[in-house]
Every structure is written in structure tokens, then in C-alpha cells.
Image (tube, rainbow, N blue to C red):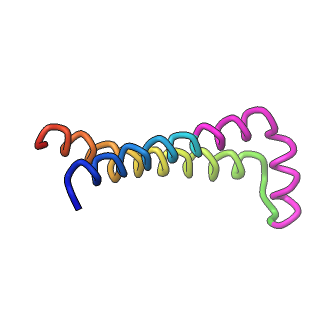
Amino acid sequence: MTIELIRDALAWCSVINIGLLLFWVLWLTLAHDFVYRVHSKWLKLSVESFDTIHYTGMAFFKICIFMFNIVPYIALRIVG
């Protein structure tokens, strides 16, 4: 494996993960009531705890994207 191949893979992983995050944000923003109704059938959640869980998950996912995709990509761009 070459540095260029790893760098390209990290770039595509970043694009895909950011796309998933944007899909999650848009889905939750535009169809909040529908998503809440579906989840509340499985779990007994208040709207506040539902929002807290989802926004915490989004924040964690965003941090993971930065730490495991974008930061290594930038480091490889600097080195290579």
C-alpha cells in the first residue's frame, strides 16, 4: 500500500461519512415527528431524551469523522 492509496481512501471515507452525517441531520430535521413516532414504538422515550440521544450521537459521529478520517488525511497530505 502506498501513501497515496491510503490518502485517497481516507478522503473517500470522509466524504461518505460526512454524507451520512448530513443525511442524519436532514432526516431528523425534516421528519422529526415521524422518526420520533417510529422510535417511540420500540422504546419509551420522551421527546427531550430522544433529541438528546440523537444530537449526542451526531456530535460523537462528527468527532469520530474528524479524528479518524480528516486528521489522518491532513497528516498524510503534510508528510507526503
Quadrant location of the C terminus in the rendered image: top left
The residue under the point 81% across, 58% down is 39
**30 up-or-down from 42: above or below:** above
**Which residue occupies the foreground of this view, 40 or 11?**
11
Q: Residue furthest left?
A: 79
Give the x, y percent position of residue 74.
24, 39
The image quarter containing residue 26 is top right
**Which residue occupies the foreground of this view, 65 or 43?**
65
The residue under the point 71% across, 51% down is 50
Q: Is residue 74 magenta?
A: no
Residue 72 is left or right of residue 33, and the answer is left
Which residues fall within the magenta stretch?
22-42
Residue 48 is left or right of residue 66, and the answer is right
The residue under the point 24% across, 48% down is 4
Q: Main secondary structure of the magenta part?
A: helix
Q: Residue furthest bottom?
A: 42
The residue under the point 77% across, 47% down is 47
